[in-house]
Image (cartoon, grey):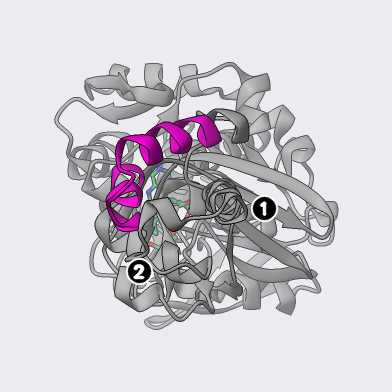
């Protein structure tokens, strides 16, 4: 029986290992952790958003790096196939807002149990056993793990990215790839918070803004994201910020502007202000601003646009009113870079796609060596897309090896 090693018992490693064992291969999955799927466990805040149920062409639009490369794998094993696969193994699923698929139980542990106990029931698990080196021989590979040397005819590297390193995914796969002559596209944090240089940030920590628009100019290219954002100790986070981080992580110059009132045009906002001013003539500016913004934000907003929030409305000039409108629509935030790579939901960059066969995920440099999932230079926005990349690349690899 042909012996295959899989390095990494994460999403892609478990998936490919199970598929190959069912096709009669003798599969061993190595993981440095004591348990399988440590990162899977924390996905979707412990609920595991296992895929995004949309058509392959829509899916590919959510891919930030590697969309063309992924086309064959996503059509070969789509998000619909993923749901069918898990349902067939007994995992009931549900679809939530934005086509996000979760286990009905809301427990990522159920996804892991099914992968480990059902899908991988004939796979040998070699846990607490870090792979430190892999060497190629004419008739296969020698995998050097902490417990010694093992021979295999093929090796699949499914070691994940470099972020949330406490899960075990800390970038070892890049070193393995380099040792075989592969190029590593520079690693960047993706889906991570953004640092701001504005001094007011700390005082807004914990404040969440709903229905705002983040307008971004990255190396001259404009991006807009609408939704929720949250102030942290050093910057901003939340869904729209995470998406923006992935889109700007390679840009040299980034400008950020916040639109507090995206539903209103500048003209409509000005009319609203005129009405509010009329109704509150003898009150302070803060009375009107608090009708438009949260109290803590209103205070900082007034300061940032150079107005005293205690100024009486009847003393506000037309120019000052226009400054308020401009500030509400285009509030400048001072971009200070991205948080550290460890905070990224995923890692952008990785094994260069030009050196990988997109049909089988086999290295073009070394026959019998494969790379799957996040270790590759592939990443997508949030919503279940990154796990689907792991499932689809694993399926393509298993198909390539087993020929089904
Ligand atoms: C907080 C968080 C939430 C997320 N939520 C979602 C979500 O809801 N939906 C979604 O689509 N994506 C989500 N993601 C992203 C998703 O988890 C990853 O993209 C996906 O797990 C990548 O799968 P993988 O198989 O490539 O690697 P991983 O799942 O990271 O698995 C890699 C495995 O390799 C092992 N390993 C590494 N080096 C070695 C070595 N030298 N020897 C032995 N073993 C090794 C690691 O221990 C690990 O178990 C989330 C990520 C994070 C951090």
Percent from the top left, x then y, of residue 62? 61, 35
**Vertically, is 133 above or below 27?**
below
Which residue is at 55% across, 54% downward?
317
How packed is label 2: few (under 14 Cα within 10 Å), some, or many (20 or more)? many
Task: Say the numbered circle drawn on residue 216.
Answer: 1
Task: Say the numbered circle drawn on residue 385.
Answer: none
Percent from the top left, x then y, of residue 398? 58, 37
**Vertically, is 349 above or below 212?**
below
Which residue is at 39% across, 41% downward?
277
Percent from the top left, x then y, of residue 257? 61, 55
Q: Circle 2 sits in a helix, a strand or a loop, which is it?
A: loop
Which residue is at 23% across, 41% downward?
47
Q: CA distance from mark 2 to mark 1?
A: 19 Å
Instruction: Report if residue 85 lies within the magenta region.
Output: no
Percent from the top left, x then y, of residue 260? 47, 45
Query: Which residue is nearer to you in this view: 319 or 257?
Result: 319
How many labels were placed on the picture? 2
Which range of residues does the magenta coloring cover? 269-292
Q: In the shown orientation, is residue 360 left or right of residue 288? A: right
Q: Is mark 2 within 8 Å of ligand 1?
A: no
Query: Which residue is nearer to you in this view: 344 or 130?
Result: 344
Task: Say the numbered circle drawn on residue 232.
Answer: 2
Q: Earlier in the sequence, mark 2 or mark 1?
A: 1
Any part of residue 23 in sight:
yes
Which residue is at 51% across, 45% downward?
1
Q: Circle 1 sits in a helix, a strand or a loop, which is it?
A: strand
């Amino acid at each position: 029986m042909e012996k295959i090693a899989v390095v990494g018992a994460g999403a892609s490693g478990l998936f490919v290992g199970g598929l190959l064992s069912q096709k009669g291969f003798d599969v061993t999955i190595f993981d440095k952790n004591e348990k399988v799927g440590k990162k899977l466990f924390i996905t979707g805040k412990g609920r595991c958003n296992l895929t995004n149920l949309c058509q392959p062409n829509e899916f590919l639009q959510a891919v930030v790096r590697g969309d063309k490369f992924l086309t064959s794998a996503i059509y070969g094993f789509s998000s619909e196939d993923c749901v069918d696969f898990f349902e067939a193994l007994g995992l009931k699923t549900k679809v939530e807002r934005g086509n996000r698929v979760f286990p009905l139980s809301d427990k990522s542990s159920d996804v892991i149990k099914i992968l480990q106990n059902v899908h991988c029931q004939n796979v040998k698990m070699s846990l607490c056993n870090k792979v430190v080196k892999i060497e190629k021989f004419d008739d296969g590979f020698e995998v050097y793990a902490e417990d010694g040397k093992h021979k295999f005819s093929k090796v699949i590297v499914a070691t994940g990215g470099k972020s949330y390193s406490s899960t075990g995914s800390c970038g070892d796969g890049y070193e393995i790839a380099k040792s075989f002559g592969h190029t590593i596209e520079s690693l960047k944090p993706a889906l991570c918070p953004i640092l701001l240089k504005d001094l007011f940030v700390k005082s807004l920590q914990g404040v969440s803004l709903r229905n705002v628009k983040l307008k971004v100019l990255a190396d001259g290219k404009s991006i807009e994201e609408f939704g929720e954002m949250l102030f942290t100790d050093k910057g901003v986070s939340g869904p729209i910020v995470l998406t923006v981080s992935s889109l700007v992580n390679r840009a040299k110059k980034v400008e950020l502007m916040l639109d507090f009132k995206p539903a209103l045009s500048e003209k409509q906002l000005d009319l609203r202000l005129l009405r509010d001013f009329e109704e509150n003539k003898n009150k302070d500016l803060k009375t009107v601003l608090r009708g438009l913004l949260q109290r803590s934000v209103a205070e900082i907003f007034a300061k940032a646009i150079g107005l005293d929030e205690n100024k009486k409305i009847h003393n506000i000039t037309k120019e000052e009113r226009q400054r308020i409108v401009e500030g509400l629509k285009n509030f400048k935030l001072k971009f200070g870079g991205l948080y550290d790579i460890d905070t990224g939901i995923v890692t952008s960059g990785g094994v260069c796609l030009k050196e990988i066969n997109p049909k089988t995920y086999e290295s073009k440099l070394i026959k019998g060596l494969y790379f799957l999932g996040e270790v590759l230079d592939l990443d997508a926005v949030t919503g279940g897309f990154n796990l689907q990349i792991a499932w689809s690349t694993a399926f393509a690899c298993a198909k390539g090896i087993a020929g089904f």
